[in-house]
Amino acid sequence: MAYIPWCLRLSPVTALPNPPPATSLWAPHPASAHTDGEAHRQRWLRRTWQLHFFVLLSHLYAFLLLVGFCIVGYVPEAVLGAYGLWVAGGMGFITWAYASGWCHKRRDPGLFLVHQAVSILGALGLLVAAPQVAFQALVMLIAFSADGFLARSRASFAATWVLTLLAVAAAFFWVGPHMRMPTDALPGQLLTIGVVLGSVARSIVLVTFFRGMQYRLSVANDKLGAALAQIETLVRSDELTGVANRRGIMESLHRQRELADRSQLPFCVALLDIDHFKRINDHYGHAAGDRVLRVFGALLAGHTRAVDRIGRYGGEEFLVVMPDTATAQAADALERLRQQIVAANWTGMSGVPCDMTATIGVAQYRAGESVDATIRRADEALDRGKAAGRNRVVVETIR
Ligand SMILES: Nc1nc2c(ncn2[C@@H]2O[C@H](COP(=O)(O)OP(=O)(O)OP(=O)(O)O)[C@@H](O)[C@H]2O)c(=O)[nH]1
């Protein structure tokens, strides 16, 4: 899974059982890389480096403050040297890990646990070695713990803070009596103000950065949700006519069957077939035939109830699911529809000089039967309608 700090994780899009992972903070996930391509990868790399550069700056700032404390005599030079080596070594390693791409291959590309362990131990070491600047060391400890926002999980975030608090308690226990705020003279006061300002600035930048990340992730998540909803609609729609395609109408039919089995309410299935449609193709070409089909789809959508479900079952054959409807009511409604088809201005609407009719077969669902059985009976009625001369509504034969 891509590395995403827990605080940036968004609720997953539920439209698909396995939604693609949201974008990672530290490295673009391979699955998401193809969406925006190289530009997207470069953007993420730039952000990673921006954050890393800022962290480097904050360490440099803390080091310069320590130099100041050393100059005015609060910190031994050996401690300053050890601290400098620790920061240079740690940051050098992390810079190498980013630059070489080594950290991107790891399960934890932010090197979170290593980073936290090194940071907390270093700050603790400073606290013990130079209790004169305990205040700065404590501020650093808390600031490093705030990096826990990069944690993979709430558990490691909580663990970071618990460990920090335990470390601080232990440090107080050992060196507590020697701790003091170096504010007895002006240089110490100024340096202490510098520590406070530095920690406030670090917090502001980190919070701003994470808020920005969270906003961008939420926008990406919304876009993904909208795209998935669009795909959901597209896979169930007929491109030519705009009504449901065979998959969509069959899903509606299965749903209606389940509802009817529960509610014991009747429902009907109607199959509609345009009469002599082949002639349109033969006389005016396939494109003209497509325009006629589009008009037929629009007529069906416009002259059926909102609760009825319409789909293109195949070729010039359409299927209508009519909920809460018994055969007699269905036959009446379909007869009105047939008349609308006859009366429609086909030439005006399709641009093809023609007058179309349709034959309709209708069957009522019988409790417990398969949807295929209902469709078969509607199809038999349709065949009888064609054989009897077309342009009519035929109800299934009750056996
Ligand atoms: N333009 C166009 N034609 C299609 C499409 N799908 C199927 N057809 C055509 O629809 C015609 C169906 O012809 P037939 O099954 O003989 O039916 P018919 O001519 O309507 O005759 P009856 O149903 O017996 O009244 C064929 O010519 C198919 O090529 C489509 O998406 N677009």
Image (cartoon, helix red, strand yellow):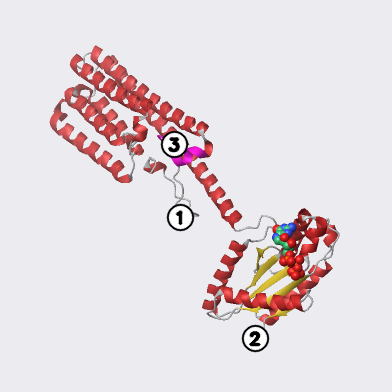
Which amino acid is tagged 3? Pro
Q: Which residue is mark 2?
A: 398
Whether the residue carrying mark 1 lies under 8 Å from ligand 1 is answered with: no
Instruction: Tell me the SS state at disc 1.
Output: loop
Whether the residue carrying mark 2 lies under 8 Å from ligand 1 is answered with: no
Q: Ligand 1 shows up in which quadrant of the image?
A: bottom right
Q: Is residue 119 left or right of residue 352?
A: left
Q: Is residue 297 left or right of residue 70?
A: right
Q: Name the spot of residue 126 as percent of width and height, x first.
A: 21, 24
Q: Earlier in the sequence, mark 1 or mark 2?
A: 1
Q: Earlier in the sequence, mark 3 or mark 2?
A: 3
Q: Which residue is mark 3?
A: 28
Q: Earlier in the sequence, mark 3 or mark 1?
A: 1
Q: Which residue is mark 1?
A: 17
Instruction: Judge whether residue 83 can be spotted in this image.
Output: yes
Q: Residues within 10 Å of mark 3 (few under 14, many from 20)?
A: many
Q: Name the spot of residue 286 as percent of width and height, x first.
A: 76, 55
Instruction: Judge whether residue 74 can be spotted in this image.
Output: no
Q: Is residue 108 above or below residue 131?
A: below
* Residue sitting farthest toward the front: 282
